[in-house]
Image (cartoon, helix red, strand yellow):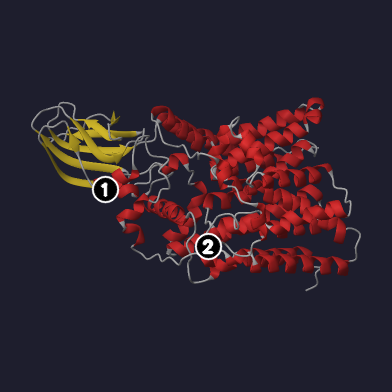
Amino acid sequence: MSFRNNKNLNIVILLAIVTLFSFLPLFNSTFYRMDDIYFDMLRIESTKDALIQGIFPLKIAPHYLNNYGYGIGFFYCPLFIYPAAFLKVIGFSTVTSFKLFLVGCGFAATASMYFAAYKITAKKYFALIATILYTTSHYKIIDTIYRGAIGETLVFIFLPFAILGVHEMLYGDGKKWSYLAIGMSGIFLSHVLASLLLAIYLVISYLIRIKLLWHEKYRILNSLKAIGVTLLLSAFYWIPMFEQMFHSRFSLNTSIANINSRGFELASLFDTKMVNQTIDTPYSVGFVLISIGLFAWIYRIKLSAFMKTSLILGYCFFFLTLKSFFWTLILPILPFFNQIQFPWRFNMLATPLLALGGAAILYQLFFQERTVQTKHFALTAIILGVFGYVGFYTFQFPYQREVITFDEHYFDKPNLHSAIGAGEYLPKGTSKRMFLNRGVVFKHDGNILLVDRVTKKKNKLSFDYFLNMKEQKIDVPLVYYYGYRYKIIQEDGTESKSYPVSESNDHTVQINTKSTHSGTISIDYVPTLLTKIAYGITFTTLVGISFFYVKTKKFPRK
C-alpha cells in the first residue's frame, strides 16, 4: 500500500497511532490517582444510575450525599458524559468506561484539529504537523491522563472549531460562522471556566482586527449569529441554571486569594522530575511547543497574519501561566481573574495556538517545495522527536502518583459520596459534611411526628406520617433545589394537588402538611415551566439547523 495512492487512509492510520501513543499510560492495568478522579468517576456513576432509573436529562443526581441528592446537572452539563455512562450500563467497569471515554475524546480532538488545520490552509502536511503537535502536546496529555479532568479534556475537542471560526470570521470571507458556533457551544457545555478563557481569546482576536470589522460590518453580524445559535443550542443548560440561581443562593465561588500564587516558575519547564508533588512542572505547555517559535526568529520566516497572531497569542497565554509581575499589576484592577483558580488553565488556549503557529514554521522549513522523500523524512523526524519528548518527560508524571483501586462496592461507601469538590453547587451556607453525617432525618415543629415506610426512587421520596395536630412543617432528607413539588395522599386515598416545597433553615426541602394529620407524602423533582421551555428552544433550534442543512445540501445556492 503506497502512501501516494492511499494518502487519506495512511493519514488516518498515522494519526490513530499518534493518538493511541498519547494515551499509553492508560493502557496499564495499574490505575494511578488523578487530580479529579473521584469527582469525575462520580459524575459517570451518577449519570449511569440516572440512565438506568430513567432520569433524563439529569439535573439532580439522587445518590450523592447519602441520598440527599446534588444538583450537579444544573451547573455542570452532563450531556457529553452520557457516552461514558452508557459504557457502564452495557457492562464495562467504571475504570474501563473512564479510560475508553478519555481515549474516545482523544480521537475526537485529533480529528477536530486535523479538520480545522486543513480547512485553514488546505495543506495536508500542514494539517498533519499541527495535529501531531496538538495531540502529543504536554499539557493536553497531562490534563487527560494526569489530572483526569473530563471537562477540560472535552474542551480540547471543540477548541479547534472555535479557532477555525475565528479564522473564518476575521481572516477568511467572514461567512462560515457555523464553525464558531460549534466551538463556542461545545466548550460552554463542557466546561464553564473554559468559556471564560475562550471569551478572552475572542475579545483580543476581534480587537486586533477592529479596523477590518469597521469596514466590513457583516463580519460582526455573522459573529452575532454564531453567538445567538450558541445561546439557543445551550438553552437547555443555561436557562435552568440561572433559574436556580434566581430562586436560591449557591456557593459557586471558586475564587482563590491570588491566582499568581499558583503559577509556575519558568525554570521548572526544564526539570525532569517533580519535587514533593508540586504542580509547577507537569502543568506547563511543554518545551516542544515553546521552542518551535524560535525558528521563526532565527530563520526569519514570514507567516500569514493569522498564523503570526496565533503564535503571538499562544506565547501570551503561556506567559499568563507563569508567576509574574503582570498578575501583581492586573489583579487589583480585575480581581475576577482569581475565579480561574489555576493560571495554567491558559495552556488550554496556548496549546492549539502554538501548535498551529509551530506547524506553520515547520511546514515552511521542511515541507514547502520539498520532494516527497524529504517530506517523509521530516515527518518521521518530527514524530520521533515528539514521541521521545513525551516518552521521556511527559509520561513520567502519572507513574509518580499512588495506585488506587475501584471495586464494584466503591461507590456504596458513604464517605465517598462527598467527592463533590468544594460543594460549589450546594445552597450557600451548607456544609457537605453536614449532609454526609446527617443520616435520614425528618425534622418538624416540635410536635409528635411518626414516620414510616420511607422509600426513595429516582428523585422521588415518599413516606407515611402521623401528627398529633393537623398542620405542621416537616424538613425532609433532600437538599433543596427549586423544582421539587409534593402531594399529600390521605388515608382514604384522596390525593391533593401538587404544591411547591419550601427551603428550610438547614437548606433541606420543607413541606407543609396542609391541615392533614396523617397520610402519605410524595415529593419529586418536576422540571419547571421555564425548564421545559428551555428544552423546547434547544429542540426547535436543532430541528431548524437540521432542516436548513438538508435544504442547502439538496438545493445548493448557485
Q: Please give left or right for residue 38 compared with residue 495 in the image.
A: right
Q: Look at the numbered disc 1 and give the secondary structure of its residue.
A: helix
Q: Is residue 101 above or below residue 203?
A: below
Q: Residue furthest left?
A: 468
Q: Which sits in the foreground, 160 or 340?
A: 340
Q: Is residue 405 above or below residue 354?
A: below
Q: Quadrant of residue 309?
A: top right
> In front: mark 2 or mark 1?
1
Q: Look at the numbered disc 2 and give the secondary structure of its residue.
A: helix
User: In the picture, which quadrant includes the C terminus?
Assistant: top right
Dot 2: few (<14), some (14–19), or many (≥20) neighbours within 10 Å? some
Q: Amino acid at mark 2?
A: Leu
Mark toward the start of the polypeptide (2 vs 1) = 2
Q: Amino acid at mark 1?
A: Asn
According to the picture, the residue beneath numbered tag 1 turns out to be 437
According to the picture, the residue beneath numbered tag 2 turns out to be 100
Tell me what residue is drawn at x 65 percent, y 68 percent.
Answer: 391
- Which disc is residue 119 wearing? none
Q: Please give left or right for residue 98 compared with residue 463 in the image.
A: right
Is residue 398 visible to us here?
yes
Circles 2 and 1: CB distance less than 8 Å? no
Q: Position of residue 352 (x, y in %)?
A: 69, 50
Dot 1: few (<14), some (14–19), or many (≥20) neighbours within 10 Å? few
Q: Which sits in the foreground, 189 or 251?
A: 251
Q: Position of residue 471 (x, y in %)?
A: 15, 27
Distance between the alpha carbons at the discs numbered 2 and 1:
35 Å
Tell me what residue is drawn at x 86 percent, y 54 percent.
Answer: 298
Is residue 367 visible to us here?
no
Tell me what residue is drawn at x 69 percent, y 56 percent.
Answer: 134
User: In the picture, which quadrant includes the N terminus?
Assistant: bottom right
Q: Please give left or right for residue 351 compared with residue 396 in the image.
A: right
